C-alpha cells in the first residue's frame, strides 16, 4: 500500500456498527491507527502500551491523566503519550471520539 485515504464520518459509522470502543483502520509495521470512542460518563480502563501514542480528539470533552499530569481535552486537542506511561481519560462530559496513532504498530501485550 502506497497511500490510503480515510474519511472521519466513515470511520465513525464503522466504529458505531462494530459496537467496539476501539476500531483499528490502518496497520503497517511503522504505525497503526484506530478510532477510540468513550461515551459520556464512561470509564477508560486501558493499560500502558509498549508503543508511543498520539491522540487527536475529534469530538467530545474530558480530562486525561498522563503519568502525574492532568489535562483538560476537547475537540482539537492533541496529546502525546510516551510508551509505558500510565494514562487514561476520565470525567468524560461529552462523548469522546479519538483518533489514535501508535508507533510502531500496536502490539496486543501491555507493558
Image (cartoon, helix red, strand yellow):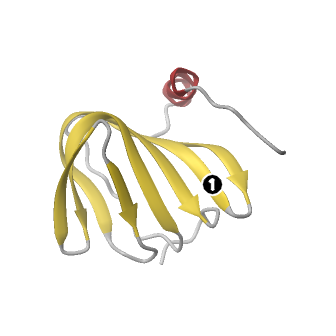
Is 7 above or below relative to 87? Answer: above
Is 104 above or below relative to 14? Answer: below
Location of residue 64 (image quadrant)? bottom left
Q: Left of 66 or right of it: where is 106?
A: right
Residue 23: percent from left, percent from top: 56, 41
Read off the residue under disc 1. 32
Q: Left of 55 or right of it: where is 32?
A: right
Q: In this rendered view, identify the residue nearer to me: 14 or 74.
A: 74
**Which residue is depicted at the point 33% across and 57% down?**
45
Q: Left of 100 or right of it: where is 57?
A: left
Residue 52: percent from left, percent from top: 49, 68
Is 40 above or below relative to 102? Answer: above
Asked if residue 32 shows in the view, the reply is: yes
Q: In this rendered view, identify the residue nearer to me: 44 or 6.
A: 6
**Which residue is depicted at the point 83% across and 45% down?**
2
Q: Residues within 10 Å of mark 1 (few under 14, many from 20)?
A: many
Residue 16: percent from left, percent from top: 49, 25
Location of residue 60 (image quadrant)? top left
Asked if residue 46 shows in the view, the reply is: no
Q: Secondary structure at mark 1?
A: strand
Quarter the N terminus occupies: top right
Residue 80: percent from left, percent from top: 39, 62
Location of residue 79 (image quadrant)? bottom left
Amino acid at each position: 500500500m502506497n497511500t490510503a485515504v480515510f474519511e472521519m464520518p466513515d470511520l465513525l459509522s464503522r466504529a458505531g456498527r462494530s459496537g467496539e470502543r476501539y476500531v483499528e483502520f490502518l496497520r503497517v509495521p511503522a504505525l497503526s491507527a484506530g478510532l477510540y470512542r468513550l461515551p459520556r460518563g464512561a470509564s477508560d480502563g486501558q493499560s500502558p502500551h509498549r508503543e508511543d501514542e498520539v491522540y487527536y480528539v475529534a469530538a467530545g470533552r474530558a480530562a486525561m491523566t498522563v503519568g502525574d499530569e492532568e489535562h483538560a481535552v476537547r475537540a482539537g486537542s492533541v496529546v502525546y503519550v510516551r510508551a509505558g506511561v500510565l494514562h487514561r481519560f476520565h470525567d468524560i462530559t461529552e462523548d469522546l471520539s479519538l483518533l489514535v496513532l501508535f508507533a510502531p504498530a500496536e502490539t496486543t501485550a501491555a507493558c
